[in-house]
Image (tube, helix red, strand yellow):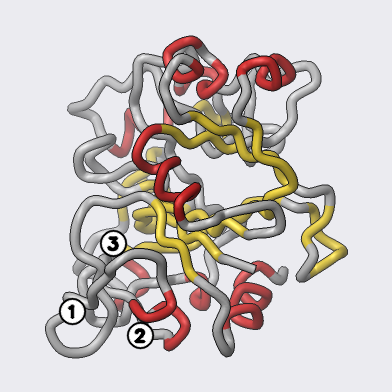
Amino acid sequence: MKIILSRKGFDIKNGGCPSPIMPDGTLLSMPIPSDDDASYDDLCYNGERYSYILKQLKPHKNFTNCHIDPDIRDDNRVSPIAGWRPAFGQSEAAQGLLSNAGVEKGDIFLFFGWFRRIEKHNGSYRFISRKTGGFYDHNDLQIIYGYMQIGDILTEKVDFSEYPWHPHTSNAFSHTGKNALYIPTDKLSLLPDLKGYGTLDYRKDRVLTMEGKNRGTWNELPFLLPEHTYGEKKNSSKGEGLYYRGIWQELVIYESAGLTEWVRSVIKR
């Protein structure tokens, strides 16, 4: 079994601020801005539209439409989509990497992103000040917020018709040379009581960022080291920690001692 650490949600270029760790611990990954038909007005959390939350956190940016992918959060549409099912799309170079690395049915995506805690102040959301609390209370962190075990990989346009709401089934993506839709298993093999996909709330063991380091420097877990990953990866950390330099979306990790147990512990409720 391979594990794929997949970077998703807001980043410096796409969004320009962290996704929020909500006051109740929800890791609310914000889909990146795009020209897709879906909008932040279409999504909601506890009755509050994503657009309302973003306006308070990023007042100088006017985000409208977004790329909802991976689409794995149940019941977050203002107007539910009839027949909705979870899916994750990938295309072009990133899909080529997954294919070349031998990603297949049964492998597990762990979705992670850039997060920071927020709070309510005078009735509005704001990021918690860096002057208060400890490292995990106010810093920018990379955190695992969701998972999907692959049950099927769709690559033919004819198979996309059952997912018309997903951006990777649109003409903009389905006409590209490499485009795939990943569909989850019914149940998670490592924890059969759970569905094959889901979102996760904040928990310290889901934080990749090493305490005291910048968000991109991770805890130096032995099974995440370069010798267990696809491609010619290099640990570029100066001193302690693990840092994979560059702009990348997918880190494919091959089976080694401790990996499966770590994944099980991260996902377990």
Asked which secondary structure carries label 2, the reply is loop
Q: Which mark is residue 140?
A: 3
Asked which secondary structure carries label 3, the reply is loop
10 Å crowding of disc 2: few (<14), some (14-19), many (20+): some
Residue receiving disc 2: 220
Q: Is 266 placed left or right of 4 in the picture?
A: right
Disc 1 versus disc 3: distance between alpha carbons? 18 Å
Given this view, does label 3 or label 2 mark the residue nearer the observer? 2
Residue receiving disc 1: 237
Q: Is 161 placed left or right of 11 in the picture?
A: right
Residue 65 percent location from the top left of the image = 39, 17
Identify the mark nearer the N-term, 1 or 2: 2
Q: Is 24 placed left or right of 101 in the picture?
A: right
> Where, by quadrant of the figure, is residue 241 drawn?
bottom left
10 Å crowding of disc 1: few (<14), some (14-19), many (20+): some
Mark 2: amino acid: Glu
Mark 3: amino acid: Asp
